[in-house]
Image (cartoon, helix red, strand yellow):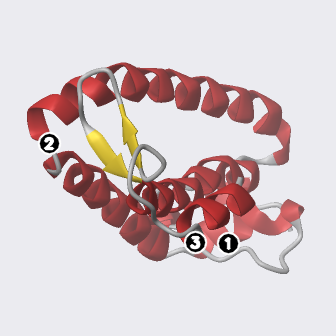
């Protein structure tokens, strides 16, 4: 997918239908802007799959990941159903709308999710217990030393 976006972004622009995607409502989107937006979405979308795999304790990881995937697919369906309607109503403002959520998600990850690089998965609970925000939600006996 990354390679496709790279190719789409750097292909030379020509006149005609090769540079624009036209949907049934007549909205035209330039190929380059579509590539950049979909790349940003992919970065955030990956966080929706990677973060839950490290957040849940080992005992409930499979159930937690199943719920995460179900909720993710539900909201992907909702966004897919509403996107064209919102595009017709909000025009280019829709991309500011999604960009705002992109910024909110990025800030949330920066400030509320601790770094787990190089830490064994069995010791992730200790990180949550020592985090400045999440420590008040972690029970004391939940630390597995």
- Chain-order first, disc 1 or disc 3: 3
Q: Secondary structure at mark 2?
A: loop
Q: Residue at x 30, y 51 (%)?
A: 98
Q: Is disc 3 in contact with disc 2, using a CB cutoff of under 8 Å?
A: no
Q: Residue at x 84, y 45 (%)?
A: 58
- Give residue 76's position: percent from left, percent from top: 49, 29
What residue would you read off at disc 1? 127
Q: Residue at x 87, y 61 (%)?
A: 122
What residue would you read off at disc 2? 91
Query: Can residue 26 be seen?
Result: yes
What residue would you read off at disc 3? 10
Q: Which mark is residue 95?
A: none
Q: For marks 1 and 3, give the CA distance.
A: 42 Å
The outermost residue toward the bottom is 118
Seen from the viewer's position, the closer of residues 55 and 140 is 55
Q: Secondary structure at mark 3?
A: helix
Q: Residues within 10 Å of mark 1 (few under 14, many from 20)?
A: some
Q: Residues within 10 Å of mark 3 (few under 14, many from 20)?
A: few
Vertical placement of 80 versus 110: above or below?
above
- Give residue 70's position: percent from left, percent from top: 61, 23
- Chain-order first, disc 1 or disc 2: 2
Q: For marks 3 and 2, give the CA distance.
A: 25 Å
Q: Residue at x 28, y 42 (%)?
A: 28
- Front position among marks 3 and 2: 3
């Amino acid at each position: 997918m990354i390679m496709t976006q790279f190719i789409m972004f750097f292909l030379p622009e020509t006149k005609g239908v090769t540079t624009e995607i036209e949907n049934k409502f007549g909205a035209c989107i330039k190929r380059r802007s579509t590539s950049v937006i979909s790349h940003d979405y992919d970065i955030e979308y990956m966080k929706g799959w990677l973060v839950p795999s490290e957040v849940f304790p080992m005992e409930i990881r499979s159930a937690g990941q199943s719920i995460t995937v179900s909720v993710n697919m539900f909201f992907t369906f909702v966004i897919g159903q509403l996107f064209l309607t919102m595009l017709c109503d909000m025009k280019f403002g829709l991309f500011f709308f999604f960009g705002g959520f992109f910024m909110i998600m990025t800030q949330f990850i920066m400030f509320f999710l601790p770094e787990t690089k190089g830490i064994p998965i069995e010791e992730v609970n200790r990180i949550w217990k020592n985090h400045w925000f999440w420590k008040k939600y972690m029970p004391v006996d939940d630390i597995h030393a």
